[in-house]
Image: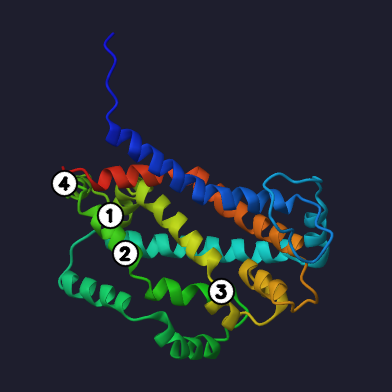
Amino acid sequence: MRKKKVKPATVVSYVILTIFALIVLVPFIWFVSTSFDYVKSYSLRFPPRLIPKEFSTFNYKMAFSNVPMLSYLKNTVIIVALSAVLNVITSTLAKGKFPGKKIVLVFILSNMMVPFESKLLPIYSIIRNMGLNNNALGVVLPAVLTNAMYIFFVKTYCDGLPDDLYEAGKVDGAGILTIYGKIYFPLLTPIIATIVVLDAINVWNDLLWPMIVLTKQSSYTVQIGLQMYNSGASGTTHAGTALALSVISIIPLSIIYIFCQKYIVQSIAFSGMKQ
């Protein structure tokens, strides 16, 4: 067997990539390991250490005893699930032809050029008049009705699907909903998984709009709860507890990404293929 020669450029590229990977991973490893380190003071130890000197779950016990984190997680999961379902339903209707489709698409996509902050006041007035304050729908509806990015993703993805599938379904006597649910919807699984992951990240990390709409502590999301604790709204802030709360807050997102990662890779690979 002849050994392949490794080019110097390849070695250099791998070294550079390894350095960048360490730059990203080391703070995360410190972040997780410190949350299991027994922190006696209200501030973190300096200089920091990657391995806990005294492994303990004290910070997590403090987190669950001082902050209603389970309630915040439940509220956030409900909002994320509702947002993902509505966004999938509205965005996957992009396949099809009708008069004026291009004009409607341009009108929808033009909404992406308008910053959300400039629309915040009128949207809040509408939500308040609808009585959706402290309600999951009040958090979800504005993003679903004004977010055109997912429609653009699905439209681009659907352009690669053959129109013959629609004609075949019509010949077999299938209706529009049957064609949508049994033919096109299963083919959209990779892009749907991508939408779910992106939407989950956006909604889970959103702070501005939920903080405006949700004013009762019982309806707070994870990000509002973290902000309130870190700002000292519940009293003095313990650094170890804050780290533990942050670790707890990223676990659901990590689970979603792990289960949907292969579909995201499929959608990226499919977008580079030509029929």
Residue that appears at 74% across and 64% down: 239
Name the residue: 59% across, 79% down.
211
Up the image or down, 224 lies above or below 155; here it is below
**Mark 2 is on which residue type?**
Ile
Q: Position of residue 71 (x, y in %)?
A: 72, 65
Closer-to-camera residue (118/59)? 59
The 10 Å Cα crowd at callout 3, few under 14, some 14 to 19, many 20 or more, is some
Q: Is residue 113 above or below residue 15?
A: below
Give the Cα distance between marks 2 and 4: 22 Å
Of the residues tagged 1 and 3, which is closer to the observer? 3
Q: Do the residues labelled 2 and 1 touch (CB within 8 Å)?
A: no
Cβ–Cβ below 8 Å for labels 1 and 3? Answer: no
In the foreground, 165 or 275: 275
Label 4: which residue?
Answer: 164
- The label on residue 207 is 3
Callout 4 crowding tier (Cα within 10 Å): few <14, some 14–19, many ≥20: few
Quadrant of residue 123 in the image? Answer: bottom left
Residue at 71% over, 59% down: 46
Q: Which amino acid does label 3 sit on?
A: Leu
| Residue at the outermost top position | 1
* Upstream in sequence: badge 2 or badge 4: 2
Q: What residue type is labelled 4?
A: Asp
Query: Mark 2 or mark 1: which is in front?
Result: 2
The label shown at residue 175 is: 1
The disc, 3 or 4, on the residue closer to the chain's N-terminal end is 4
